[in-house]
Amino acid sequence: DFSETSGTAVEWAGDLARDLGIPVVVAHAVEPIRVPSQWRPIAEESDERRLSDARAKLEGLSARLHGVKKGQTVVWLGSPADSIASIADEQGAGLIVMGLTGDQGPAAARPGSIAYRVLSQALVPVLVVPPGEGGRLKAEG
C-alpha cells in the first residue's frame, strides 16, 4: 500500500533474503474501480494510470533492497488479498512479508483485514510487520 510500514516490510524481506541468499519479489495489487458498465471505459483508463503509478512507486521501494538478489517487480490488478496470495503461489515464494497499515480514514480497510485474508489464502507462511516498527530486522544473540 506504499505506507511507511510497507517500506519497512520491504527492508525486512531484504534482510531475510540477503541472509538466506534468495531473491525477493516485490509486489503490489491495485484494487480495480467498480462502476456501472456505462462508466467502465473511464474506469479502465483510471485503472491503467493507477497501475502505472504503482509500478513507479514499486520501483522506488525496490531501490531499498541493497545487496539482495532481486526477482521480479509485480503489479497486479485485483483484490489485494487474492492477488498477494496468487502472486506468491505463481512466483514460488517461500514467505510473504507484508506491512500492517493502521487506519487511513473511513474508506480504508480495517487494520489487519487484508493481512488476515492473505494469511487465510496463502500456501506459505506470512510475516506481518506492524506499524511503528522502524529500523531493520536485527538478529538477537
Image (cartoon, rainbow, N blue to C red):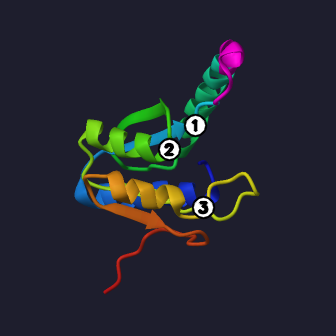
Residue 134 image offset from top left, x and y in percent: 58, 70
Q: Earlier in the sequence, mark 3 or mark 2?
A: 2
Q: Does the CB distance between marks 1 and 2 fall below 8 Å? A: yes
Residue picked out by circle 2? 80
Magenta-tinted stretch: 34-43
Q: Main secondary structure of the magenta part?
A: helix
Q: Is residue 42 magenta?
A: yes
Would residue 7 be visible to someone looking at this image?
yes
Above or below, comparing residue 89 to residue 129 in the picture: above
Q: CA distance from mark 1 to mark 3?
A: 16 Å
Image disc number at residue 101? 3
Residue 60 image offset from top left, x and y in percent: 58, 40
Which residue is most to the bottom?
A: 141
Q: Nearer the viewer, residue 137 or 76?
A: 76
Q: CA distance from mark 1 to mark 2?
A: 6 Å
Residue 81 placement, left or right of 95: right
Q: Image point 27% across, 47% down: which residue?
A: 93
